[in-house]
Amino acid sequence: MPEKNLYKELAYIFRAYDIRGIYNQEIIPENFYRIGLAFGTYIQTEQGFQVNKHHVYISYDIRKTSPLLVQAFIAGVLVTGISVEFSGDPLQFGVCMFSAWKREAFAIAFVTASHLPPEWNGIKFYHGNGVGFSEKDNMRIRDIFIEGVFLKAPWNQTGQLEVVNLSEEYKAFLLSKFKLKRALKVVIDCGNGSSCLSAPEILRGFGIDVIPIFCTVDPTFPNRASEPNEESLKMLAEKVKAVEADFGVGFDGDGDRAVIADDKGRIILSDITGLILAKYMLEEDKSRNRVIINVECSLTIEKVLSSSAIVDRIKVGHTFLTEAAQKFSDTIIGIESSGHMVFPTVYLFDDAMLIPIKLAEILSQEEYPLSHIIDRIPKLSKRKVAISTPDIIKFDVINSLLANIRLKYDNVNDIDGIGISFGEESWVLIRASNTGPKIRIIVESDSDSRADELLTQFQKLVEEKISEFS
């Protein structure tokens, strides 16, 4: 009887965009050492990495288990003969990507579990150009991890480790790229995460009066969930109103996403924030007129920008966002509904730190407050629901539904899931989550009643189809 491969049982921790799990369950140092071996083997055998020419850059977030896991991972990478530039200290995500970019790293690894609870951890991989590893890349690393056939260099050819941290250069670079015409007051909520390490200091460098909330590092995330949304950012919203700030910003756990609150304390959807930034940036730079958005973003973006920009919709995921931004040289901004954004005139990877800086630059030139700008944007009613669906059937459910819906409706697309357009004022998106056992339905319409009607109609369809497969 063949010996059982215990590592095959860990296949599920390898996701479309990253690796993640709970510490002392799936995520342990021994496994991270093995992931380092698999990563190092993969980029040498299938990505063209040359040990005498290239290096990788590695960093980590502020989670309690990250220092331990990153060192185990690095050990595995070094064993394969790859030299590593290591941040030494934890970094906000953007500082990691900036450091790797400036040092011309072949690939990047960042130990983090992003917005997940503190007992979780994981790792994300990026190519040297800032584009995240694709699902195919991550699945190949998974296969090598399971099979256990690794490159192992002899003792005199193991990779070498060097500590390289460009935090100060990152701050100086941003200060050189943006200019504020007047002082602003901004409330910043770091959620005790990695943004504490640099975001308040950088904003103060622009002369901004920074009012900090939860800006002391605490890997237990004691004050709010590390996912920035209307619920977790309530205190931010209240503080903005109390101190009469120009706006507030809340970051997720590793600082790669940012959500804005206006001067009235209203939490603004990230795609609407992106729309405001895009509108001003298109006026500033006439050489670029392409705005890239994912399929979950509001139809409002097309309604407002259609006369001045090419608006391209792409699949959900910041990997696709950075990839598309690099593909089209006329891209002015890339917008993810989750809070990721790319500013190609600055650099070609997503960095949430740029969101509040660019917004501050715009408002410093504007006579009206942010709330006034937002209130002038056409309003559509948006509804979202997530339906629990086992991973093993969720994509089959979508494919079966797509065939049925094509027979009934004319304007259907399959860019990412099932998109159905009902003229210029209503649309429905049904897509399987890439990160969890669920199917998401997003509806947008010009009235609350129509949005509710569409959500009820398509939620029933999805639930019936799930029952068929279950």
Image (cartoon, rainbow, N blue to C red):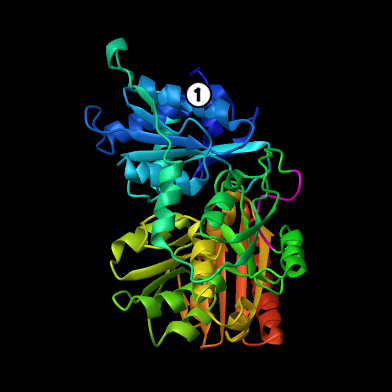
Task: Residue 310: tell me if it is visible.
Answer: no
Report the magenta stretch's main SS: loop
Task: Residue 240: tell me if it is visible.
Answer: yes
Crowd rating for badge 1 (residues with CA inside 10 Å; few <14, some 14–19, many 20+)? many
List x then y, in percent, for residue 421: 51, 81
Q: Look at the picture and state if 299 lies above or below 200.
A: below
Q: What stretch is highlighted in magenta?
A: 222-229
> Which residue does the image show at 69% across and 82% down from the upper left?
453
Left or right relative to 366: residue 103: left
> Which residue does the image show at 64% across and 46% down from the upper left?
116
Left or right relative to 308: residue 28: right
> Which residue does the image show at 61% across and 46% down from the upper left?
196
Residue 281 falls in image quadrant: bottom left
Q: From the viewer's side, name the closer residue of 339 and 355.
A: 355
Residue 260 falls in image quadrant: bottom right
Residue 40 falls in image quadrant: top left
List x then y, in percent, for residue 136: 39, 46
Work out which quarter of the rendered image holds the C terminus and state it.
Answer: bottom right
Report the residue marked by disc 1: 72
> Which residue does the image show at 45% across and 74% down from the upper left?
278
Residue 226 magenta: yes
Regarding mark 1 in the picture, which secondary structure is present there? helix
Q: From the viewer's side, name the closer residue of 427 and 329.
A: 329
List x then y, in percent, for residue 43: 32, 35
Q: From the viewer's side, name the closer residue of 455 and 109.
A: 109
Q: What amino acid is labelled 1 in the image?
A: Ala
